[in-house]
Image (spheres, rainbow, N blue to C red):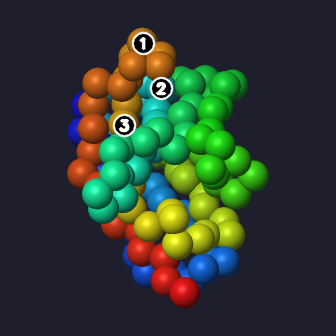
Amino acid sequence: VQLQASGGGLVRTGGSLRLSCAASGRTFRTLNMGWYRQAPGKERETVATITWSGSTTSYADSVKGRFTISRDNAKNTVYLQMNNLNLEDTAVYYCAAGVHYPRFDYWGQGTLVTVSS
């Protein structure tokens, strides 16, 4: 499975970004997907996950109500809509895929999100 994340950039506090992750190499609709992030000097953390059907999602407490994970199986793409961004959201964001939820075995390269005041 190959994963290509995009959509990162520089945004002011309170702003929005949408990350995308395109998957290839395996039937996308069989894959559970997730977004993770790693801030400088911190451990990697789970941001949001979504099951293969899209029926179940989960979020880190720090992003609940602000971030939304979704998927378009016709486009082989998972999204992360990020609203009301704050300084603590600055990190490299990675998408991940897996077959046996909640384990993720495939990882893409990261996309950097920088939130400035």
Q: Percent from the top left, x then y, of residue 104?
A: 36, 25
Residue that mark 2 sits on: 32
In front of the other: 52 or 61: 61
Q: Residue 95, position in %: x, y?
A: 38, 44
Circle nearer the N terminus (2, 1): 2
- How many numbered marks does the figure carry? 3
State yes or no: discs 3 and 1 in contact (Cβ < 8 Å). no
Q: Report the amino acid beneath label 3.
A: Ala
Q: Quadrant of residue 86?
A: bottom right
Sort mark 2 into few (<14), some (14-19) or many (20+) by Cα contacts within 10 Å.
many
Lower position in the chain sequence, tag 2 or tag 3? 2
Residue 114 image point, x, y percent? 42, 74
Q: Amino acid at mark 2?
A: Asn
Query: Where 114 falls versus 99 (above or below)?
Result: below
Relative side of 11 to 21, left or right: right
* Figure quadrant of the N terminus: top left
Q: Which residue is mark 3?
A: 96
Q: Residue at x 65, y 43 (%)?
A: 61
Q: Marks 2 and 3, how far apart in space?
A: 8 Å
Whether residue 15 is visible here, answered yes or no, is: yes
Please give the name of the residue rendered at 67% of the width and 25% of the height, measured from the top-left corner.
56
User: What residue is shown with label 1?
Assistant: 100
The alpha-carbon separation of the residues under discs 2 and 1 comes to 8 Å
Question: Helix, strand or loop at disc 2?
Answer: strand
